[in-house]
Image: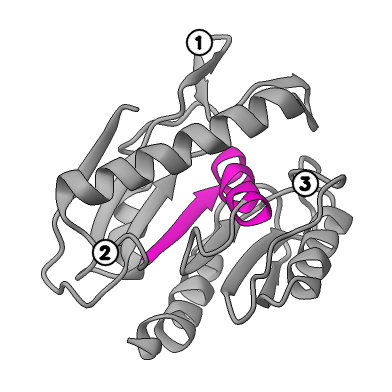
Amino acid sequence: MKHVFYKGTDSRRPTLLLLHGTGGNEHDLVGLGKEIDGSANILSVRGNVLENGMPRFFKRLAEGVFDMEDLKFRTEELKIFMDEAAENYEFDRDNVVAIGYSNGANIAANLLFEYENVLKGAILHHPMVPRRDVELPSLLGTPVFIGAGKNDFMCPATESEDLRDMLQDAGAEVELFWHAHGHQLTQDEVQAAKDWYQTKVKSEE
């Protein structure tokens, strides 16, 4: 998978797995990752699927309607890539925190839905429920931040609330942050994610 890797200055910090939204690329969220934790490794990945020339992490049949077979395949592909990257770049595979936006947040959520201990934690900006026909693995104690917009017409409020409930039912510790805007990533949402990360993830080192 096309990607960039930036070595952090503190090996105790998590490696941040950055996953862009539809039409983005591996460079889009690097600034966000550095804002969240300027000392961490950054592994930023480009989705392997194209929709009308725009990179995505998995196919969809229509807006809000996911291709479930492709979602499963691409999630496994991403997990294998993470495993290989940990060896290639010599970072702790057990200390990876995903930061995803929109489509990237959806595949990050599906990693949690599919695999136990795949992530140390996750920051999900404007995600949807990736699948509803699956029993989640144990996520006991896994910290997850969900950022959502009250006027996000691409991602209805029920999606964020249902995702929170499903993750919590599997044992995750979920914080759901709301802002009054739409699907865009706002500065107050980024600040809330950074504050959450400082207390819920970095403090666990």
Question: What's drawn in magenta, residue-wise?
Answer: 96-114
Residue 136 relative to residue 184: left or right: right
The crowding category of the residue bearing disc 1, from other C-alpha atoms within 10 Å (few below 14, some 14 to 19, many at least 20), is few
Answer above or below: position of 98 versus 13. above
Q: Which mark identifies residue 155? A: 3
SS at mark 3 in the image: loop
Instruction: Give the spatial CA distance, label 1 vs label 2.
Output: 34 Å
Residue for point 75% across, 71% down: 170
Quadrant of the rendered image containing residue 92 = bottom left
Residue for point 38% across, 52% down: 17
Q: In the rendered structure, which disc, 2 or 3, sits on the residue that comes first in sequence?
A: 2
Q: Looking at numbered disc 3 in the image, what kind of residue is underneath it?
A: Cys
Residue 60, given in percent of the width and then of the height, sits at 72, 22
SS at mark 1 in the image: loop
Instruction: Give the spatial CA distance, label 1 vs label 3.
Output: 22 Å
Quadrant of the rendered image containing residue 7 = bottom left
Instruction: Give the spatial CA distance, label 2 vs label 3.
Output: 33 Å
Q: Is residue 113 magenta?
A: yes
Residue 43 relative to residue 124: left or right: left
Prevalent SS, magenta region: helix
Which residue bears the numbered disc 2? Answer: 92
Marks 1, 2: nearer the viewer: 2
Which residue bears the numbered disc 1? Answer: 53
Q: For the N terminus, which image quadrant?
A: top left
Residue 120, given in percent of the width and then of the height, sits at 46, 69
Q: In the rendered structure, which disc, 1 or 3, sits on the residue that comes first in sequence?
A: 1
Q: Looking at numbered disc 2 in the image, what kind of residue is underneath it?
A: Asp
Q: Looking at numbered disc 1 in the image, what kind of residue is underneath it?
A: Gly
